[in-house]
Structure formats: C-alpha cells, structure tokens
C-alpha cells in the first residue's frame, strides 16, 4: 500500500502532485472511497461527516474531481457480509480517511476487518487527514484528547496509545498551529522523546509520502523531524 499522510488534506499544489504520482493517473481517472468514521465521536460529528462527504469542508479530499466516489462506513461493516464490501475496497484506487478521533477510528478499523485487509491492498493509495494519518502510525499522539470521548462503560481506552502501525514512523499534525497548544515544538518534543521511532511534526501545508517503507516529506510549509 502507498500512503499520503496529510495534516489538512490536499492543501496545495505540491501535495496534489504527490497524490497524482502515487495514483499513477490523473485524479479525474481515479476511483475513491471516503471513510468519515473518525469524526462521529465529536459533538456535531454527523454534520461534519456530511461536509467531508459532500466536499464542502475546508480540507479538500472529496471535492477533487474523482472519477467516482463512494462512502465506506466502518461502523456498518461488522453487520454486512464481507463479500458485499471487500471487493469494492479492493477495486478502488484511493481510500480517503477523514480526521477526528484517532482512537475511535483505529477501534473501528480493527473491528470492521479493514485493518486486516490494508496490508494486501498493494496498488491502493491511502490518503489520510489528521487522525486519518495518525491511525496508520504505531503510536497515537492524540491519546489524552481521544480518551475524553470514550463512554464511561466502554473498554475502548485500552487501545488508546496504539495506532494500526502500517508505517514505521510517528506523526504529529497541525504543527505550529497557534490555536492548538499541544502542537507547539516544546510539547511535540516532549511526546516524541518517549517514542522509539522517528516522529514527523507537519503543518497543514505538509504531507508524508510513504512508499515501499521510504518516507518523503512534501511541503510548502513547515515541518520538523524528532529522532528517538
């Protein structure tokens, strides 16, 4: 699988070109599925999911002119025959994974069976945004924030610190955002110091392109690498 891990979607021309490069074809000739699941655990999550799907959200993923676009709702998959959804996932060119709650997203990736399917999707491009990007790393940098959305009677918090681990680096999005206190250099440095893999802090104009285990930074903004 090929990965384009972004902080805020296809935010500039450099990231758009990286996406086309991974697809091996123009976006207008490529098929995609949007996964909005991560946003549901937030207040107003349903409304934000619709904005993501409809392409009216400020972070562009769906509104890029795809040849075809569908919805893959992870919370529904455990109640559906696998043969009714898996062929669709295997056939598309790109999975577009929206932001929100990393813990909630990882939980449903595992429970739905998608996490087990990802390693065999050799030609598929995984396009993550914020939480959708963090989920592919081994470690969840949003763990304290995400735990605030776990229901009291749920044991979902046991998975809080772990991502799916499809890439071998950690990721901290929204680097330097003045409205996010946790996205400061000092805070990210403290978190990264306890992680045994390299941590890339990326701002909203930056993405990580990961192919065959090799990491490439695509940026028109700011980023920083923290080594363990």
Image (tube, rainbow, N blue to C red):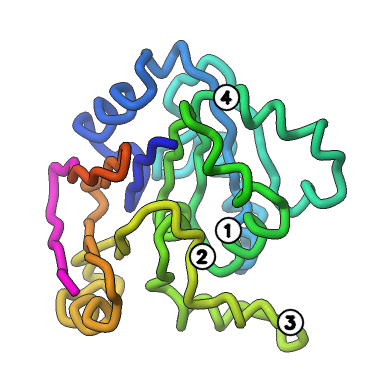
Q: SS for tag 3?
A: loop
Q: Name the residue under label 2.
A: 102
- Residue drawn at x 33%, y 48% as measured from the top left: 6
| N-term mark: 1 or 4 | 1
Residue 141 rendering spot, x and y as whole percentages: 38, 72
Q: Quadrant of the N terminus?
A: top left
Say left or right for 141 vs 41: left
Q: How far apart are marks 1 and 4 (CA)?
A: 22 Å
Residue 188 rendering spot, x and y as whole percentages: 23, 76
Q: How far apart are marks 3 and 4 (CA)?
A: 34 Å
| N-term mark: 2 or 3 | 2
The residue closer to the viewer here, 48 or 218, is: 218
- Residue drawn at x 73%, y 82% as measured from the top left: 154
Residue 38 rendering spot, x and y as whole percentages: 58, 58
Which mark lies nearer to you, 1 or 4?
4
Which mark lies nearer to you, 2 or 1?
2
Instruction: Answer above or below: position of 34 versus 98.
Output: above
What segment carries the magenta color? 218-228
Q: How far apart are marks 2 and 1 (CA)?
A: 9 Å
Q: Mark 4 points at which residue?
A: 92
Q: Distance between the residues labelled 2 and 3?
A: 16 Å
Which mark lies nearer to you, 4 or 2?
4
Instruction: Answer above or below: position of 66 versus 193.
Output: above
| N-term mark: 2 or 1 | 1
| N-term mark: 4 or 2 | 4
């Amino acid at each position: 699988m090929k990965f384009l891990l972004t902080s805020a979607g296809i935010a500039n021309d450099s990231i758009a070109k990286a996406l086309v490069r991974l697809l091996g074809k123009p976006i207008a000739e490529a098929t995609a599925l949007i996964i909005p699941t991560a946003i549901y655990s937030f207040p107003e999550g349903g409304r934000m999911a619709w904005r993501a799907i409809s392409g009216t959200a400020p972070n562009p993923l769906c509104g890029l002119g795809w040849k075809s676009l569908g919805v893959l709702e992870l919370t529904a998959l455990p109640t559906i025959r696998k043969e009714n959804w898996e062929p669709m996932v295997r056939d598309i060119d790109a999975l577009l994974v929206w932001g929100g709650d990393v813990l909630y997203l990882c939980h449903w990736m595992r429970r739905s069976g998608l996490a087990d399917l990802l390693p065999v999707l050799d030609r598929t491009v995984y396009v993550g945004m914020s939480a959708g990007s963090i989920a592919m790393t081994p470690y969840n940098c949003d763990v304290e924030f995400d735990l605030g959305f776990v229901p009291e009677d749920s044991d979902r918090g046991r998975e809080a610190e772990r991502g799916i681990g499809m890439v071998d680096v950690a990721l901290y999005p929204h680097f330097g955002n003045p409205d996010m206190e946790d996205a400061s250099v000092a805070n990210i440095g403290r978190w990264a110091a306890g992680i045994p893999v390299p941590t890339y802090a990326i701002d909203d104009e930056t993405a990580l392109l990961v192919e065959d285990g090799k990491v490439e930074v695509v940026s028109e903004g700011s980023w920083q690498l923290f080594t363990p």
